[in-house]
Amino acid sequence: MKTVDLVIIGGGPAGLATAVKAHELGVKDILILERDIQLGGILQQCIHDGFGLHRFGKQLSGSSYAQKFIDKVEEYNIPVMCNTMVLDVSADKKIVAVNPEMGLIEIEAKAIVLAMGCRERTRPQVRILGTRPAGVMTAGAVQRYINVEGWKTGTRAVILGSGDIGLIMARRMTLEGVSVEGVYEVMPNLGGLRRNKAQCLDDYNIPLHLATTVVSVHGKKRVEGVTVAKVGPDRLPVPGTERYIACDLLVLSVGLIPENELSRTAGIALHPITKGPVVDSSMMSSAEGIFVAGNVGAVFDLVDYVSATGEVAAAGATTYLEEKRVASVEKDVIAGEQVSFVFPQKLHIDPQQEKATVYLRVRSTMRKVKLEVVSGDEVIVTKRENFVTPPEMVSVEIPLDKVDTMKDLSIRVVE
Amino acid sequence: MSSFESSMKEIAAKHEIDVTKITWEIKDEVVYFAGNAHEWSAMVAFCQGVAKLPEVKNVVSHITTPESVQKQAIDPTPYKEMGVVKEVDVLIIGAGVSGCGIARELSRYDLNILVLDKNSDISEGTTKSNNGMIHSGYDTKPNSLKAKYGVKGNAMYTQWSEELGFHFNRTGSFVCGFNQADMDKIQELYENGVKNGVPDIEVISGDRAREIEPNLSDEMIGALWTPSAGYVEPYEVTLALAENAIDNGAEILLHTEVVDILQEDGKVAGVVTTKGIILAKVIINAAGLYTDEIARMIDDEFYTIHPRRGTIALFDKENKGKLHTFAGKAPSSFTKGGGPQETPEGTLLWGPSAKEVADKEDLGVDRDDLDFVIDKGLELTKNIDGNSLIAYFSGNRAATFKEDFVVEASKKVKGFIHVAGIQSPGLASSPAIAEAVVGLTLGELEEKPREKANYNPHRVHQKEFRDCTNEEKKALIAKNPAYGRIVCRCETVTEGEILDAIHGKVPATTVDAVKRRTRSGMGRCQGGFCGSRVLEILARELQVSPAEITLKGKGSEILTAKTRNGGLEQ
């Protein structure tokens, strides 16, 4: 059995940022395990721009953003095994992986960073009825076919879900000559970033139908059409509002779920709302020495945040590997008023650390609000935001020395 | 008015069928109806009612309703002109579990056997959407063929699974009772099961049932327990049967539809297919939903198939181990259908529901179907999240109005065998049906064939990668590195297994066919990741353009056209 100081599972933006940062912090024995044939993760198929505005101050394509990290990995000579699928991770950090060249690989890691990313939700999760013909696909699958394989998967498309991938694919398909009939969104508000609606729908006259969903699919062999209907406040179709739309492709952009099969095999505690591991502010999970980076922990809307969590995980893993991690107080961060979840869910109060970044999603769209971090009765941080909306994650920094570990700590949003 | 007429009119009135709009004729105890009625399900209920009359052997209905689907008959002339392309001893129409089971059992004899199917793969009809239950046989009518073949077939599964190497879990089944009325019904079922010869059947307390299956509802007060019930993956059984039949010399021809049957001197001579004429001494009609249409070709239509649609829901593997045995509910009146169970691969499966539909190809899922399956599952179990659904789909049962199997030689045309109305417990019965059909076939052949000395009942099968130990995995990858490349992440399916499926004895040529053989795309992402990879491998191995690869046969192509620059690879 091979031993490695730090094994990073996943070579997408989270894993890459982790590897680069850990190397820079002095970890020299690192191994990245990537299941695809190359590094970059889903960014490989994201040829549109809009990546890296926070980190690099300019709009990059997804693949260019990833390349900046891949170049560093190469420069630092960080070992990478591509085409390698991890089959099992145990709580004591033993990894079983497989690839065609080496066969079954068994590794004992001193620390692990989980960076497996997320996957798309599928048709059954949104309960679309009717038949199961060819021509019902997730937006990511359509994106892969168009951008990587060079194939279109339909001539007239309906898109369900106004998340970012759905919006991006509305534009991408239009540019390839696919007629996009419209984007339908079950919620009364946009699911993705506002700038994506402007650039991908408005500029191409693609209509967005809010509070409307796809009820059923028609066609035996290939999609022939879909039935859409308005939904009520309960998000269920309103009888009498059904409308048939002829199309040969239904594209689903109905959300992402962290990919945590390996976290489960390792017995790591998962959070019911984020669907990812419960982590502290050093990104360590419930399993000692197993850290979490990026979308495997919670689904982010910006890759910049994904990279940032990778760097936090790298720092956490480095401290752990150097045996400098303090067994200190863990403080739960409570999602307060108007907050649907926080990530990380706990603060790791370490005297060597000044502050911790916590990400959160708000419950509804609001203007001119204050984000307040409350320790006991005292507001210890106030951050003003002009506009907050559930699809756009918000971050807040918490000075650790101001946290009273004896009292409840929560984050709330007030108007 | 005869007693039949008065009874029939009474049934008609109950279902609001206007008897002035229908005609009837009785020949050899079979009632033939024609005309029209106001509604499909009422027509079905009426015909089922008439079929229950003691003097009625079966019912043929040509009654149309507003829901009826008009099917254009295929003109056989151009296909006849293609001439004779093949000559065999026994021709089996339909490559479902019945057809493949019969082919396998017949392949022990020195006979040329050919199985035809109009679809792009075996088990593409009723078989693929079966819930995989091997019923114990407590609920079938005593002395019916369902009772006879069901209990016998169940027992034969042990040998089939040992010889053919498919997954088979004999975990038992429950009928759950929640009140005294349920328990009374359970007592009836118990007595019925005893009559049918169901082994080790007993009525047990709710607590005893929860000892066996802890996640059964706390509200349940008692249950019927039949330990002989079991579970298989129906498409795996069918593939195993087909492969073993092929090993023993049988042939399977897909994409081939029978459009007419040829006769000579009151005997079958062969069939006209979309690939030309195939001569045969014996023809076995195992065409599932289409058996009545095939029977019509020899003017021996004495049953009608009315499709009864069943919807099944599958749940995420995070539920693995929460339930092992099938749990049904005491049937209140005429509610039929299944309940929660775990498939041999560890997937939680709920359903099927039961709904009469007019179109044999109507495989849609309606809101009420899905609600029925999920509500029933939630009622019978606990600790299972109804939202962890990963897939749902429908299949159609091939039911006759008599609601029993038809397994007999034609009385009109020599050399023709009906295997019709094979619905629940058809999968459980298939070994016994196959055995019976072997007997019938030998009776129809003029010369009794000899048994082959080299008949091999065992199928050689490569164990699935995911089921291998680490040492076995190492050995597999050393033999072929393609076993080290995981294509389907959710179900851990390797490229090696996909290649085996594509180049197997019954080659997989569609994405769904690969899925049924390997499980790629059956997991929680439902092919989101692996779909494009499987398509690429299929195109490469079959040496065709990716645009020709289909989901499930012609007309279900996945790609429509190249992009302007043809992608990154160019």
Image (cartoon, rainbow, N blue to C red):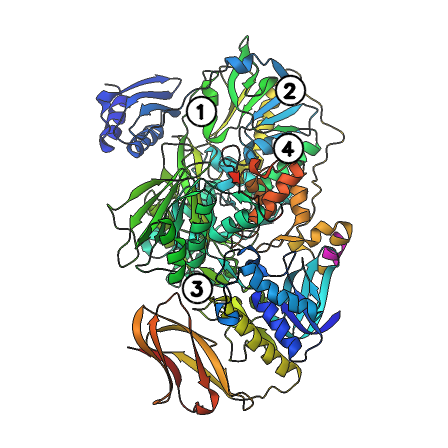
Q: Are marks 3 and 4 in contact (CB under 8 Å)?
A: no
The residue tagged 3 is B383
- The residue under label 4 is B104
Mark 1 crowd level (few <14, some 14–19, many ≥20, 10 Å Cα):
many
Which amino acid, by three-letter code, is at mark 1?
Answer: Asp
Q: Which comes sooner in the sequence, label 3 or label 1?
A: 1
Q: Are marks 2 and 1 on the same chain?
A: yes
* Mark 1 vs mark 4, CA separation in Å: 24 Å
Residue contact between numbered discs 3 and 2, judged by CB atoms under 8 Å: no
Name the residue beneath numbered marker 1: B292
Prevalent SS, magenta region? helix
What range is drawn magenta here? B471-476
Mark nearer the N terminus (1 vs 4): 4
**Element assignment for label 3:** loop
- Which residue is rendered at x = 22% and y = 21% of the image? B20
- Secondary structure category for the residue under label 1: helix
Mark 2 = which residue? Answer: B89
Residue type, label 4: Arg
Q: Are marks 3 and 1 in contact (CB under 8 Å)?
A: no
